[in-house]
Structures are given as structure tokens and as C-alpha cells.
């Protein structure tokens, strides 16, 4: 390694970060080892593997893994690697199987990863090969679920998921509580969107509330310009509630507030957000009222956040019911997955609105996301300049309020970025 | 069951419409493109093969007139950073087949294969797939009531698709 531990620690200062955290492939590899292999990483939702034998595949950092439900209804996260020659055992995004069977020599594994059988065993007789030696089974990752959201880690010593989520779990609870049935399920498919930037640029943008009025002005203008040509009695459109708030003023965003937590998590909003003024579907309201009563329903629906980051891999919008998952590929390439969720017990119109939101804001054909991406790849390219080695994050520095487990600041504060870089520094230097 | 066409003349008219639409997207000229669509026309790019509908599953695009009008304005908006880059396309349409045609109204469903090279941000990206156009008669000519664009890699990790294909 060409960095000393001290030099790594020095890349992050209280109000600035060194450009190399975005541009150096060596730092990226180190992040994969020290952050992505040590933190809890979002794998998928239990509803994606509803029955015995259902699986999904993905990469955890660079490691191919499979999430699968076994016959005892347990969900496992396993290394997707045959214990024999190392071939990936399943290679579709999702599927259903009675057991794992390698495409090469036919080694078979139970759904919990235990090696079941090896063809033509007599060749191993008299050797010290032991089929029951765990090294020949599929290796299990440490995994835990919180309200159906499954996380895994390579770190045997870290905190449990609940401790790690800390106060930021409130937003995941809120997402699930917004279902009259108290649970959510993944629905309506996924979008996979290639971003030509470092993974951190994407998560720094989530609660950067100083950019929307600049970056999204064009789409907001275009929408408002068309809306004003429509007759006043035109039917209400969800689009007209979803797009224009992206052009909200500094003052509006200031009011939303940023809340930061240990381990790098943060959210924007709480009392209000750019999702707060959506029309409440009367059928949904009736279902919520029935499930929770008036007071509790009000508490759930009035807790309104914009983006919440569970550092480093998962970001959710509880008020919209979609999530985006960060899958880093290289120092300058990241895949962002957008998943939509159904609120159990809610009318179908709620999922339709979520899917509309995912398409309008997060799809590859969106008029919103591509303007963010333009900023990201320009940063990635601009930082090749050595004009300065540092990127600042001063906004409202020293004015954050400490409230027990959390720090709270104004909506336009860089508290979010400082929060995640404080975690970055801690993860990156702990290993030393 | 509706009869499948039809006269050489009708097929020729349909082909000309598809080519004209493609030529507006080649430039791209959304002001003229949008005029080829009926007021209730839609443009849909599904995110999975054989996707059944645009509302209960995510799509890459699903624009009705309202979103087409917003997109037409957005595409030339000076503050849209993603639109600062030159966009040029070249569409080739072939294998045109009239699948279904109503002899009385002239309405028909037409499938075709397309290859489109899209030049954006100094790079050229190929898209390929199938178009399904629903055409209806308005006065003397055909208009597009719906266009479905099934790109063969719809479920892959894709980059930004900056304009209709």
C-alpha cells in the first residue's frame, strides 16, 4: 500500500476531504475492505424470496452472494461459490431451486449451503477429503433482518443491526408503519442505473439541499410552464405534486433540517419534506385509520422525510416507499438500483404512485436524475485537476446541535456530508 | 377478427409514417415529433421483456401527452445540464409487419425492428429492439396512438437514455 495509516486518516479533515478519496483506485479497494466488508450492507428484502428455494443473486462489494430461503423458512446469505472449483452456483438475478447444483461437476448443496452430495464419491476414498468438512460447503455470511430488510457483513465483531441502525431506524419503521398491515414488500421490479462516478458522490447528493433549485430548475420550469397552459379545472395529476417541489427555495429546504447519527447515517426532513404535500388517497386514509386509529395514523403520516442514508449501501424514501441501493463497481463507476415497495393492506393506487415516482425521478429516462448524474461525472472528471487537493464541507460547521444519539442541523447544512465522512474515517482507520 | 391488410398503398403509408417519426427522433426534433401523436397518445419503454402494463411495474419511460409536453420543453431548456451535450441519433427500421388492422376504421397495430445509434456526450450507444405502434386514422392521415419500445437489453444496468428511442 502506498499510503501510511496516518496519511489515510489525514484524507478527511473536519471541514474538508482530499480529492483522492474519489479518484484513487487504491483508496477504492481499501474502502471495499475496510468499509464495505465491515459495515452492514443491504442485501435485499425478505419478500423477494417468498418461498422455499427462492433466491436472488448480487455482488457484495466484489463478492458474489446469494440470498435464499430454506425449508425451515430461514433466509440465508451465502457466498455464491461452489466448494469444489469455485464456480458461481446460480447466475440468474432471481429464481427458484430445490437445491443448489453446480453446473460444472454436479456438486449439490442444501438451501442453507451445506454440501449434500458429490458424484462418483469412490474416487475420494482413502484420501483425506471429507465431504462434511465445512470448508467444502457454501460459506454463510453473517446476516440479520430488520423489518424484512436483510443486511449482511463480513465483520464477525461489529454491532448487531439494531444497534448499528440506532435512531435512524425510526425512518425504516416509518416506511413499514405506513402500511396498514405494518409490513412492506418489494413490488414492481427494479431499475439498474449505471453512474459514471464514485459511489460517495451519489450518497453525498441525497441530502445536499443546496443543489435542487439549481440542478432541477429545468424540469421544474418545464413542468410549470406546461401546467400553466392547462385549464384550471384539469384533473389533478400526481406528477404535478411530485416534480415541482424539487425546485423549492433555500428557505424551504432550510426548514426541513438534517439529522445525523453514528455509523454515517442521516436523513433530511422529519417535520416536513418535499414529499409532505402529496394528496392523501382517501381509500388509503380509511385503511390507515382502521389499522391504527386517528392519533397513531397522524403520528405516522406526519413524520415526513426526504432521503435517509444507511451508510454506505442503502437509501430509502419512507414517504414515497422506494429505496435506492448503492453497488460500487470501481472508483469511477457505481450501479444504483431503485426498488419500489407495496404497503401491505393499502389500495393499489399507493404502489402505482410509488412506481410513478421511481420512473419520474429515478429511471434512466427520467428528466430529474440525469441532471444529477451530469454533476457527478463532471466532479469525477474535474477532480483530475490538481488545482486544489481539497473539497470543502463548511456549511453550518460548528452550529450543529447534539441531541443525545444524534446531531441536528439546518436543512442546508453540510452536516450530512460531515456525518458520513466521520464514519468513513473511523472505518478506514480502525483496521490499522 | 380484424383482417390483416391490406393494400400496398396502406402499407406504404404506414412505412412513411414510421420513417418520418424516426427522422424527427434522429435530429431530435420533439416539436414536430409530438405532432405525430394523438392527444391521448403514449410512449412506453418497458423495463422487462413482455411487461404487461406501465402502471404496476416500473418502466424506463411512460409518457402521455402531459409528460411529452414537459419533456419537449425540458429537452431544450438552457438550465438542463444533461441537455448541454449534442444529441444525434440514427434509426434504421425494418421487418415492418401489420399485425392487426380494422378495415372499417383503418386503425392498425404495426410491429417493426429497429437499430438506433445514439450519440451523446462524445460516445455512441447502440440500442436495438422492437417497436409496436398502434395507429389510428385522423382525417386523411395516420396518427400514433401508442408506441411501445422493447429494447433487447431493457433489464440490464443501463446508462442515461437522454431522449426517446
Image: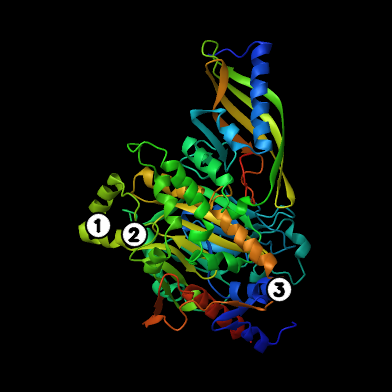
10 Å crowding of disc 2: few (<14), some (14-19), many (20+): many
Quadrant including the C terminus of chain A = bottom right
Q: Could you say where residue A31 lies in the image, as x and y percent from the top left?
A: 64, 74
User: Where residue A380 sits in the image (x, y, percent)?
Assistant: 67, 66
In the structure shown, which secondary structural element does the residue marked by tag 3 occupy? Answer: loop
> In the rendering, at what x and y percent does residue A101 appear?
66, 54
- For label 3, the crowd category at 10 Å Cα-Cα, with few meaning under 14, some 14 to 19 and many 20 or more, is some
B9 on left or right of A48:
right
Tag 2 and tag 3 share a subunit: yes
Q: Chain of mark 3?
A: A
| Residue highlighted by disc 2 | A177
Res. A65 visible in picture = no
Label 1 secondary element: helix
Q: Secondary structure at mark 2?
A: helix
Residue furthest to the bottom: A6
* Closer to us: B36 or A134: B36
For label 3, the residue is A24
Residue beneath disc 1: A292
Which of pointers 2 and 3 lies earlier in the amino acid sequence? Answer: 3
Work out how far the residue at label 2 is from the one at label 1, CA to CA, in angstroms.
Answer: 9 Å
- Residue at the (62%, 67%) spot, across then down: A139
Amino acid at each position: 500500500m502506498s499510503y501510511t495509516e496516518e496519511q489515510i486518516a489525514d484524507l478527511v479533515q473536519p471541514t474538508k476531504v482530499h480529492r483522492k478519496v474519489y479518484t484513487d483506485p487504491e483508496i477504492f479497494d481499501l474502502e471495499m475492505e475496510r468499509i464495505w466488508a465491515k459495515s452492514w450492507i443491504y442485501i435485499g428484502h425478505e419478500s423477494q424470496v417468498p418461498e422455499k428455494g427462492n433466491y436472488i443473486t448480487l455482488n457484495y462489494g466484489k463478492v458474489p452472494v446469494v440470498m435464499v430461503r430454506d425449508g425451515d423458512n430461514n433466509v440465508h446469505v451465502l457466498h455464491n461459490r461452489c466448494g469444489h472449483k469455485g464456480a458461481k452456483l446460480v447466475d440468474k438475478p432471481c429464481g427458484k431451486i430445490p437445491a443448489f447444483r453446480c453446473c460444472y461437476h454436479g456438486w449439490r448443496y442444501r438451501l442453507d449451503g451445506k454440501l449434500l452430495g458429490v458424484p462418483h464419491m469412490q474416487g475420494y476414498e482413502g484420501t483425506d477429503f471429507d465431504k462434511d468438512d465445512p470448508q467444502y460447503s457454501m460459506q454463510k455470511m453473517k446476516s440479520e433482518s430488520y423489518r424484512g430488510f436483510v443486511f449482511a457483513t463480513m465483520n464477525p465483531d461489529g454491532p448487531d443491526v439494531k444497534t448499528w441502525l440506532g435512531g435512524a431506524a425510526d425512518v425504516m419503521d416509518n416506511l413499514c408503519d405506513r402500511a396498514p398491515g405494518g409490513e412492506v414488500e418489494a413490488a414492481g421490479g427494479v431499475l439498474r442505473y449505471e453512474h459514471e462516478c464514485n459511489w460517495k458522490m451519489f450518497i453525498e447528493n441525497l441530502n445536499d439541499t443546496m443543489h435542487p433549485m439549481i440542478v432541477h430548475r429545468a424540469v421544474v420550469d418545464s413542468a410549470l410552464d406546461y401546467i400553466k397552459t392547462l385549464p384550471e379545472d384539469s384533473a389533478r395529476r400526481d406528477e404535478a405534486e411530485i416534480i415541482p417541489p424539487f425546485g423549492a427555495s433555500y428557505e424551504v429546504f432550510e426548514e426541513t433540517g438534517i439529522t445525523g447519527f453514528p455509523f454515517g447515517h442521516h436523513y433530511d426532513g422529519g417535520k416536513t419534506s418535499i414529499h409532505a404535500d402529496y394528496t392523501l388517497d382517501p381509500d388509503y386514509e380509511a385503511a390507515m385509520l382502521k389499522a391504527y386509529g386517528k392519533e397513531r395514523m397522524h403520528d405516522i403520516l406526519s413524520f415526513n422525510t426526504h432521503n435517509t442514508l444507511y451508510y454506505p449501501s442503502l437509501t430509502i424514501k419512507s414517504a414515497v416507499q422506494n429505496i435506492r441501493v448503492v453497488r460500487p463497481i470501481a472508483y469511477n463507476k457505481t450501479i444504483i438500483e431503485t426498488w419500489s415497495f407495496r404497503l401491505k393492506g393499502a389500495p393499489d393506487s399507493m404502489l402505482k404512485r410509488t412506481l410513478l415516482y421511481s420512473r419520474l425521478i429515478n429511471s434512466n429516462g427520467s428528466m430529474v436524475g440525469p441532471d444529477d448524474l451530469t454533476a457527478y461525472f463532471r466532479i469525477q472528471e474535474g477532480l483530475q485537476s490538481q488545482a486544489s487537493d481539497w473539497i470543502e464541507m463548511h456549511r453550518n460547521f460548528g452550529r450543529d446541535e447534539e441531541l443525545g444519539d444524534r446531531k441536528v442541523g439546518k436543512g442546508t447544512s453540510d452536516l450530512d456530508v460531515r456525518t458520513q465522512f466521520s464514519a468513513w474515517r473511523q472505518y478506514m482507520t480502525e483496521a490499522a | 377478427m380484424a383482417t390483416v391488410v391490406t393494400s400496398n398503398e396502406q402499407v406504404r403509408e404506414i412505412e412513411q409514417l414510421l420513417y418520418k417519426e424516426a427522422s424527427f427522433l434522429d435530429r431530435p426534433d420533439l416539436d414536430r415529433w409530438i405532432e405525430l401523436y394523438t392527444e391521448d397518445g403514449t410512449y412506453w419503454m418497458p423495463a422487462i421483456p413482455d411487461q404487461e402494463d406501465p402502471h404496476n411495474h416500473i418502466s424506463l419511460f411512460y409518457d402521455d401527452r402531459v409528460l411529452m409536453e414537459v419533456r419537449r420543453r425540458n429537452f431544450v431548456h438552457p438550465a438542463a445540464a444533461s441537455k448541454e451535450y449534442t444529441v444525434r441519433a440514427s434509426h434504421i427500421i425494418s421487418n415492418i409487419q401489420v399485425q392487426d388492422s380494422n378495415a372499417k376504421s383503418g386503425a392498425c397495430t404495426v410491429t417493426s425492428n429497429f437499430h438506433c445509434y445514439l450519440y451523446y456526450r462524445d460516445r455512441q450507444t447502440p440500442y436495438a429492439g422492437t417497436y409496436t405502434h398502434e395507429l389510428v386514422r385522423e382525417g386523411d392521415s395516420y396518427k400514433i396512438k401508442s408506441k411501445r419500445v422493447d429494447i433487447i437489453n431493457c433489464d440490464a444496468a443501463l446508462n442515461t437514455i437522454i431522449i426517446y428511442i
